Image (cartoon, rainbow, N blue to C red):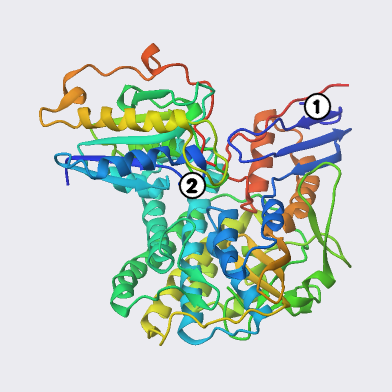
Amino acid sequence: MTGTVVVGIGNPARGDDAAGREVARRLRGSDLPDTQVVESDGDVAALIQTFEGRTRCIVVDASHCGLRPGTVQRLEAHAGALPASFAAASTHALGLADAIELARALGQLPAAVVVYAIEGRSYAPGGGLSGPVRHAVAVVARRIRREVHPSGGPLATRRSRPAHSPRSSTLSGRMRRP
Amino acid sequence: MNAKRSRTIRVQSLARLEGEGGLLVRTRGGAVTQVQLKIYEPPRFFEAFLRGRHFSEVPDITARICGICPVAYQMSSVHAVEQALGLEVDGPLRALRRLIYCGEWIESHVLHVAMLHAPDFLGYESAVHMSKDHPELVQLALKLKKAGNELVAVLGGREIHPINVRVGGFYRVPARSELEPLAERLKWARDGALELLRAVARFEFLEVEHDYEFVALRHPDEYPFNEGRLVSNKGLDIAVDEFEQHFQEEHVPHSNALHCVLKERGAYHVGPLARYNLNFDRLPQIAKDAAREAGLEPTCRNPFKSILVRAVETVYACDEAVRLISAYEPPDRPFIEATPKAGVGHGCSEAPRGILYHRYRLDGEGLIVDSSIVPPTAQNQKTIENDLWRLVPRLLDLPEAELTLRCEQAIRNYDPCISCATHFLKLRLERE
């Protein structure tokens, strides 16, 4: 198995936590070349299995870092470990950062792994996406369409940007998994 | 380090936690003077907003209480509602309920044994750090967890917060052809679980023993999941609907969570160690042999060896799943229709962490009037505190960081709802 997988992570019943899944839903009908689009609840074993055998992986998830709601951050996993703030907030599950670090330790991380994090405003049960996050979802979906391009797109042609570069912004909070 | 001076071990607001949690331990002159453990208790919120809901909504709402054991909440809730409605679910539907529970035990136990608790025994900060030196253990655990997740997904409709469980049975039941491929993977998983048990049997265990009052379900024939009487090793033997006559929840000043105690005798212990001690004779031979090979006797009172018992129960769950699939014949209909009527119903099932009790009062239209949900972690909270009371004096000569880790490890013996938060204890010493 090669090619690209886009993984939208989140809990569709917890407000802005559905952001990742909503991006995946928008992309599903886009007919992206050599690309599978999946939704995930963030289970670490399932994520590592999803990474397996892929050339590249683009993951989308909600974040809770103290940024303005709707802020989009783009991180490249091969530039370094994801910030500690991206660790799981659940009391039972390991989170996205753990999945990436486990895959890295097990030699199963795809050659290219990009994380898009959308800062949420509210994670309360019920309700839909907040306005800023709904807008960010559309932005991220467009950016991913441009990345997944027959010519290889930005992942193949531009230098990796470190996770802590100004473009990636300051990650001082937690990536939340209610 | 001088153990005789006064020390205060104060847990700050815990990182990577869904709610409040904290630990305070005070010592003076080498003796523990205070232990306070706070655990977040989500069911309080759910009991309130279940009022006025229709009984058919209960399994889906209560499944949201926990992301790692939603099946347990669904099972306890449907059994309680069915008791109130006078409904009995038997035959293949009953078997399918045990089967989906096997899936949950496998994925929950494996996650805890390998990814949350094993790092404590091997001296690693986290599963990620451990995976660099023990990739085979992590790979095995991920594959085992996947087998459990698959079982829950096939029977429940999805891995997290299953949607296929309903009062009276299921919305849809699988064909044999859907379960047979799973059986092959579960046969592998049974061998994998034996390998996992052998791996954890090589750990070093602190020699700790206590004469707990263990409480678990006991069934005439089966290692318990959904049915049985509530029994203990100190004389308790009651029907599930007598729970509130013998157990009570009490407020403690230092915690938002309620402590649940036996009215007559106080703290008690639920979970794998309780089930194992009270039901060893109900395990199939493969699990009994595996337990003995791992150095376990039919009775075990060392809470640090709960990791071994979880691994034995994983072997059991894989074996039971294989047995249930081979005997499965699809039922005539996926559920038994329920007619609303006023009444009270009680349900108790064995969540991976221990007995989970539900009680619902329904009105004549089938709406919830009130409910009570008592999760296993609330029932173990006082026992966890008592364990720390006994353990900390033995460890006071340790460096601060190691003392903290040992306290965390002791709490993780119970796989409580805060167990996956690493570094959740921050020690601060206050010198007099």
Q: Position of residue B184 (x, y in %)?
A: 30, 71
Query: Dot 1: what SS?
Result: loop
Visible in this render: residue B228?
A: no
Identify the residue at image location x=57%, y=65%. Answer: B57
Q: Position of residue B390 (x, y in %)?
A: 79, 48
Q: How many residues crowd mark 2 within 10 Å: few (<14), some (14–19), many (20+)?
A: many
Task: In this rendered view, identify the residue nearer to me: B242 or B46.
Answer: B46
The mark tally for this picture is 2
* Picture quarter with the C terminus of chain B: top right
Q: CA distance from mark 1 to mark 2?
A: 34 Å
Identify the residue at image location x=45%, y=34%. Answer: A62
The amino acid on which the numbered mark 2 sits, given as a three-letter code, is Met
The image shows residue B42, relative to residue A120, as above or below, that is below
Q: Position of residue B392 (x, y in %)?
A: 77, 41
Q: Which residue is mark 2?
A: B115
Visible in this render: residue B390?
A: yes
Q: Is residue B5 left or right of residue B47?
A: right
Q: How many residues crowd mark 1 within 10 Å: few (<14), some (14–19), many (20+)?
A: few
* Picture quarter with the N terminus of chain B: top right
The image shows residue B2, relative to residue B79, as above or below, that is above
The amino acid on which the numbered mark 1 sits, given as a three-letter code, is Asn
Residue at the extreme front of the image, as rendered = B365
The image shows residue B92, relative to residue B243, as above or below, that is below
Q: Is residue B359 left or right of residue B318?
A: right
Please give the chain letter of the residue carrying mark 2.
B
Task: In this rendered view, identify the residue nearer to me: B2 or B321.
Answer: B321
Q: Which residue is mark 1?
A: B2
Q: Position of residue B303 (x, y in %)?
A: 67, 56
The image shows residue B268, relative to residue A165, as above or below, that is below
Query: Dot 2: what SS?
Result: helix
Dot 1 or dot 2: first in sequence order is 1
Q: Is residue A33 left or right of residue A102?
A: left
